[in-house]
Amino acid sequence: MKNRSLNDNSSSDEVHQKSDSFLVKWLKEISAVNQLELCLLVIEEGCRDPHSGFFRDEMEAIDCLLGCIYSSSAIDKWSTMASILWTLQQFEGSDHFQRLELQIRSAEFHIEAGRLLALYQVPKPVSFFLKSHNDEKGVKQLLRLILSKFARRQPGRSDIDWSSLWNDLRYLQEKAFPFIDLEFLLMEFCRGLLKAGKFSLARAYLKGTDSIVLPVEKVENLVILSAREYFFSASSLTCSEIWKAKECLDIFPNSRSVNAEADVITVLTVKLPNLGVHILPVEYKQIKDPMEIIKMAITSQAASYLSVDELIEVARLLGLDSQEDISAVQEAIAREAAVAGDLQLAYDLCIVLAKKGHGPIWDLCAAIARGPEIEGMDIISRKQLLGFALSHCDDESIGELLHVWKDLDIQSQSELLMALSGTSPPNFTVEGSSFISLPGHSGQQLLPHKDFSAMANGVAESDFEAHVNKIKSKLAEVAKDLPFANGTSWDDLLRDNGKVLSFAALNLPWLVELSGRSELGKKFSPANLSQKHYVSVRTQAMVAILSWLARFGFSPKDDLIAALAKSVMESPVAHDDDVTGSAFLLNLIDAIHGVEVIEEQLKTREDYQEISSIMNVGMTYSLLHSSEIETEDPGQRRNLLIKKFRESISPDEIEKLDKSQSTFWIGWKEKLEAQKKVADGTRVLEELIPGVETARFLSGDINYIRRVIFSVVESVKSEKKHILKDMLKLADTYKLNRFEALLKFLSSALVSETWSNEEITTEILEFKDEILAGAEETINTLTRIVYPAIDGCNKTRLARIYGLLSECYMKLGETTDSQSSKNPAHGPLGLAHFCKVLEQECKNMSHIRGLNFKNIADTSWLNLKHFNQEVYDNIDEYSVDALAKMVQALVSAQPYPVSQDLMSWQDVHRHHAMTLFKNLEEKAHNVKNPESLQGLLTDLEQTYDVSRKHIILLEARDALGIMKQYFSGMIPLNINFLVITNDLVWKDCLIVLLNFLVRLTKDIQKIASEEKPSAEILATSITVLLKLVMEGKVMPSQGWDVVLGLCNHGLTVDPTAQFFYFCCSMVLSGCRLGATEAVFSEVTKSFGRVSNFEDVSGVYENIVDRILQSLVQESGEPHKLKNLLSSLSSSEGESGTLEAVRLAVWQKMTNFSDNLELPNHIRVHILEVMQCTLGRNSKPEYDIVPWEGWEEWHQSQEKSEFTSDRLVSSKSDPSSRLNNTLVALKSTQLASVISPSLEISADDLLTVDSAVSCFSKLCDSASSDSDFDALLAILGEWEQLFAAEQTEEPSPQTSDPGANWSDDWVDEGWESFDPVDKEKEESIPLVHPLHPCWKVIIEKLVTLSRFDKILKILDRGVGKSNWVSVDEDEAHALCDAMLKSDRYAALKVALLLPYESIQLTCLLSFEEKLNQGGFPDITHEEQEFLILVLVSGVISTIISKSSYGSTFSYLCYLVGNYSRCSQASQLSKLSPTEKDAHDPEQEEFCLLFRKLLFPCFVAELVIADRQVLAGFLVTKFMHTNAALSLINIAEASLSKFLKMQHQALQGETTSIEELKASKVLGNTVSSLMTRSRNLLQSALSCLPGGYM
């Protein structure tokens, strides 16, 4: 397809198709023989210049290049192909290139795909990709081959290698083989990962990628197949393939199929070996039925069958987890246990299998039941096993098993009777004989009994005869004589059948005795019968006798049958018991005997149900005897009896019965009917009214009857009883007021919570006409009794009451005269209509659970007191519409005039809309970040969408009020406390908000009339602002400020004011002039001139006037002016407009600052702001962006006004005058500390001389520290002015014409001289332009002997610039004056000045003082002295020259003393008692000494070639052990110390910052820090060996 597309596009030009040039043909031919390098050379040359003539046009060139690439069969020249294709990039953008761009890109993809295939050792020519879609199967095989080779070629590849392979495969699929399903590719890749053992990586990919998620079923199948490959390739149960299979399955642990595979591995590797079975995976693969493995496990070892649970667990793990499979496993274990002689286990399993109904085990169950004694197996268990065997055995075994079961049944009955009665069969003896029955009669000795014939062989004949005669007499009591047709007699039977003889001799007398004992007639529920049947011990004994007689084919006597029936039918008795007894009676030969039994039961019974039951049974009994129905099958007879006893007797059968036995049954029937009538009456009263005194009812006690019947009717309040018909029937029967009873029931049911409306309606439906007939009484009952008792929230019940009232009023209106009421609406018909409306609205409000409808209305009037509040309390989103409809319906249906205070249906919608807005306001308080603001804006739109449906239903005034609140109150109150940035999230929020505002203003246009013009203008303005925000011309922070200002102002009626405030918000938010002008232009274009200004400059002038006025009143916000000026900083838009606006604003501020009546601080503020616009003030508190090009433009406008003198000119240009005025005002503020009357003018600062003169006057008035601080602050302000001017003056070198020479010429040969000249220039200090002022203040301090203040002043200038406070002559004069009073102070001052001659002079004077007076006491001043000596560099002179020996000794003394103090300070920190007694200043200096001063002093000693002294000091400082040789240790210790200190200065930034913050000459210490690094490095280089 791609090939065809390529050919079609390439041959779109018929000229190229018909006749290729010779060059094109030749290039395609040599590319076909893979000479691509030659093709590349020709193509590069031909494409370099399109007009070279190689190709006719671009189309032929592109077609030729593509043809050369696809005609080549090379598989190793991908770079050459890429180079050929790259030459087409110069055609990019042309029409031919765009037409064939798809084919060109495809060629790029194919080349890259071919390179990848070659990389993975499956190379294919590039033409392969054109036809690959026709061989999808081959491509899939190719991809599988790549994965296979990748895994085999280097097995231990990393996850990164596999990830790279996946990326390459994705590229191949996307660019070369798009017809390959990505799911297939991912599946094959995961298959390769699993085969390579990269399970963790496979788990990650099987979860899916960004573009595809694999189906769970396919993932399971892939994991299982891969695990099986590992598992079935295992040569043993412990080899690594087993563990790999488990790891593979662990990838998908929650799958049932995967877990089943893991279970198989667990069985073969763990479970079966523990049972003695070893099966290899290959062998397991050949086993088809897992049951074979179970059988192998059972028979593998002698006692393997004992591991029942393990075997069952193995079966489950192998998949035999169904109930049938588990039962088959248990069957196999049971049979193996029986074979092994373990009958106990076989019995336990047989019991379990019998309960499950596992039929194949029946033979083993029968064998165990008939087998020897087993622990825990009783007769019941044997019967259970035999019963199960009977249910599942074959036809041949059923007879034998049945006989055994009957024997066990008789035996179990005897054991039960022994347990119930506490007796046992007595010994049977014949008086005077030696024959005695078997001793003991345990359960196992009763059946089967031994053959008595064997026992009688050794007994006398006379004794045996006497024994048989006694047995025969007992048999005669319960059984009829045998019809021995074959000549067999009782004697012969007893002699030949030992079982009969033994039972008749041992058990029968005992059973007869039990059946005759009256105290054993109490019924019980035996365990083997249903809970519905109750029998006594006597009954059980007679049943046992019958069972034995039936076992041996004996016929029972009528007396036994009648006694059994009588015992069954004794009270308490159920109908089934009567049926059972009657069934026994049907076996009597004499039916009259059965009638006697029934008659006896009729006499003894008292309960109606029992009497009715025996009567019905007796009638059925007689019917069955009178009918001539014969059956041969016992089952057929049983079914017939059940059917007859359960069916009722038909009249035809009764008539037939009367005709057949009229004399007996008619009398019996009349007697029964009379008894039944009395019983029925009593029964009805007892059923309807439990506990009633029937005698008082039957006697006609009317008061008792009324009280009882009404009490029963009222009981329906608490219990649902459908008794209305019965109670009304009783009321009619006993002459009570029927309607009163009916209303009593109605009121009781309505106030009850157990009755539903439907149930009440159904119950009274038959009597509805009676209720409406007494409408007036019904209304009184409903309004006075029922309505007050109903909860107002039970609206369904109230609706039913209103419905009944409506029907009653309607009925009452039909019967009364319609003219009797002046206003028909107030009559019954009006009330009927109102109640009908109440009923309907009650039903409609049933879903509002909290609504109390009694606060809405009563039975005839609206509840005006609570109506409004109840409606308001229940308004929400789901109820608002329903409540509005309810209010509208009730107000319109009210039969009386409506109060003005009553709410309307529109009030419901208005209240809900306001509630939604208030809820939104509460959410706005929780906005803390842009994310929560996004959520608020989403809620705002959703809330407005919901509210809008209700707002449009309101009157215009109310609707506009709510919309205005949305307009002004939509921004969170705490948004001003958030930091609004220009991030994308803030921009998105702003766009959402502006869109909402546009929508809101358009909605306002539809509703408002007066505000419509303002809304239209505002909508247009916001639309333009939205566009500017989206285009990035207005920053999000600016846009938010606009919206805040707009919302604070709100919506006004005046469109002019509305538009001005919008423009004002844009300007004060810092929006660029172009943005404001865009809004101004669009509004003017759409609506004409809507403001008092012709252009935007008027807006700016008005805003500036307002801001400046607010500054005077001290009510303004400083950021407003800052934003306004910043909005004009960029030179965007029309230059004329921008310059005009700038000039207008500048003129306003200039006039304002020139107003001498304003306070100085306000003028200073404005002047500083104006300086910011010029870029000359960078105070962070202003943060005003300078105006681009403003200073140059302004200077060009005023240039003609300046004089030619440079100094005067510099003071006369506007910016300089501005600076002078600003500095003068600030200086006046500072000078007020010295004297409030002092004032400095701008003229005082025109020249240095005037400034010095002014400063001298100020110094004359200074005396305190605060005064001198003020003077220093004033000098700081002046320094900015005069130092900047001197810096701007051109140096002589810059005026040299040679300075303008070209760089190439100047640099030639002068490279080596530049650094030297630069260093010299940097080393030459510049004298401060205000040095006379510094001299004045220092002289003032000298006269006051404030030398410490002088040091602090000079320290402030250290390191700040290259300025020197005083020149050399002034320094000489000052030091000479100080030497007269304090040589020590003079030396320290000299050390702070960069004049070496003055330093040496003062140093010689100090040396003389030390030689004359000795060392002074160590105070705080010595700390300063040590620092100044080290920082000035004069210490090298002190060390090297002997003339300063005392000074050097003094310095060593200071260093030693401070070393001791420093070490003591460190030791004190370790002591808990002295830990809190530290001096902070002392601690600070000790730290300074350890970290800086001592290392610098040691370094100076080393540089001055005093290594021995330096080593001594270091060893002492480091506390080197005295036992070590000083000479051997000092050098190494010194080198180690200097290295450590040098590294510490390079790395310990925290300590360095602490040192710089020192209170002792902080700037000087900082300068020493800078010098110390080079100093320590130089000292290290001076040590032997360099030690660097």
Image (cartoon, rainbow, N blue to C red):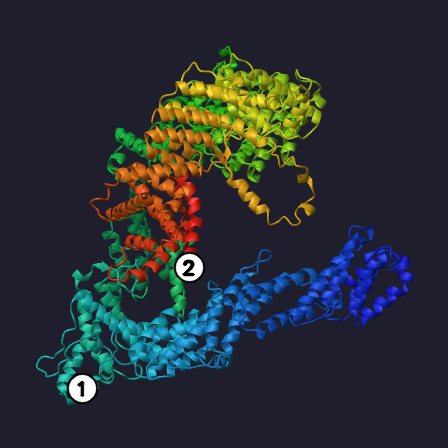
In the rendered image, residue 611, in percent from the top left (x then y), is placed at 29, 51
Q: Residue at x 28, y 33 (%)?
A: 708
- Residue 812 in view (yes/no): no
**Quadrant where the N terminus is found in the figure:** bottom right
In the rendered image, residue 228, in percent from the top left (x then y), is placed at 51, 74
Q: Residue 1587's mark? A: 2
**Circle 1 — which element?**
helix
Q: Is residue 1058 left or right of residue 581?
A: right
Of residues 1477 and 1387, the one nearer the viewer is: 1387
**Circle 2 — which element?**
loop
Q: Is residue 1197 left or right of residue 310?
A: right
Q: Is residue 906 left or right of residue 293?
A: right
Q: Residue furthest top?
A: 822
Of residues 942 and 500, the one nearer the viewer is: 942
Q: Residue at x 53, y 65 (%)?
A: 159
Amino acid type at mark 1: Met
Residue that numbered label 1 is attached to: 455
Packing grade of label 2 (10 A; few <14, some 14-19, many >=20) is some
Amino acid type at mark 2: Tyr
Q: Is residue 1370 left or right of residue 419?
A: right
Q: Residue at x 59, y 25 (%)?
A: 1125
Indicate the quadrant where residue 1477 lies: top left
